[in-house]
Image (spheres, rainbow, N blue to C red):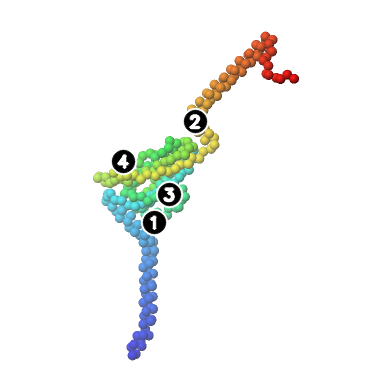
Amino acid sequence: MADEESLRHWLPAVGTVLAGVVAVVGTVVTLWPTAQGVDRTQRAEVDNMERFLGACADNADVWQSAETTIPAIVAVDLDEARTVAVNIRINEVARRDIPDDGDNTTEQILVRCALGARLVPVTDNIEADDLDWQHQEFTATGELDWAWTITATHPKTAQVRLELRPALAASEGGYVIPVDDRDSPSTKYTIDITVEASVLDKVNAWVSDNSGKVTAIGAFAAVVLGGLIGWLAKTRGALRELRAAGTPPPSRGRRRR
């Protein structure tokens, strides 16, 4: 009986101790990923990126999900240079560091170990400093960055097209950008360009765009004005002849009182 009484006395205390141990272990398990500096989702992304980069080091043709940030709309001043920047990242930690800019848009894409990018003017009033493919390969940072300089030559609305084409592993090593979309389809985005210009620049552009119409209107006005001047000259000559002959000029139809 004494043993049973003793056991009953100690059981609640043992239960309390066990509960405390379970709570401490649970807390340690929960905080462990945070203590590593990366949560579970980020850790999975980082590990996946490391495997992807490891395959790239072996010159493999592998795919990886990525996120790209591109401008949704770009405002440029007429005849002034402006930079268009594009960022692609496969690193979740870096991905979350990108600021939320209302002028940018974010898209999910698939990439290979290397990527080609180019910026192509869609409208004829935009000039880009480089129209060729720019080749980059992913490194330990898990990010790629491109930048182009564009210039607007006319105040009308404009567009450019961003093209991203995954590169293929070459048999001799390294990666090459295919010459067309058959082996590696491109991802394409259209970026709107708004051109800021003064009223005088807009008027000059309108006159230049409508020079044919302006010329035609001017020629028609010249013909009409020439005809009017000729008619007035003939009328005045006829009046002078009538006065010289002593003939009163034609009546204008006044009523007699």
Can you identify the residue that label 2 sits on?
210
Q: Position of residue 153 (x, y in %)?
A: 46, 36
Nearer to us: label 1 or label 4: 4
**Screen quadrant of the N terminus:** bottom left
| Marks 2/3: CA–CA distance | 37 Å
Query: Element under label 4?
Result: loop
| Marks 1/4: CA–CA distance | 33 Å
Query: Which image quarter: residue 133?
Result: top left
Q: Position of residue 40 (x, y in %)?
A: 36, 61
Q: Residue furthest left?
A: 171
Left or right placement of residue 210 versus residue 229 in this view: left
Residue drawn where x is 47% and y is 50% of the image:
102
| Marks 1/2: CA–CA distance | 54 Å
Q: Any mark on residue 105, and which? A: 3
In the rendered view, tell whether residue 26 sits above or below residue 93: below
Q: Position of residue 80 (x, y in %)?
A: 48, 39
Residue type, numbered disc 1: Val
Query: Element under label 3?
Result: strand
Query: Element under label 2?
Result: loop
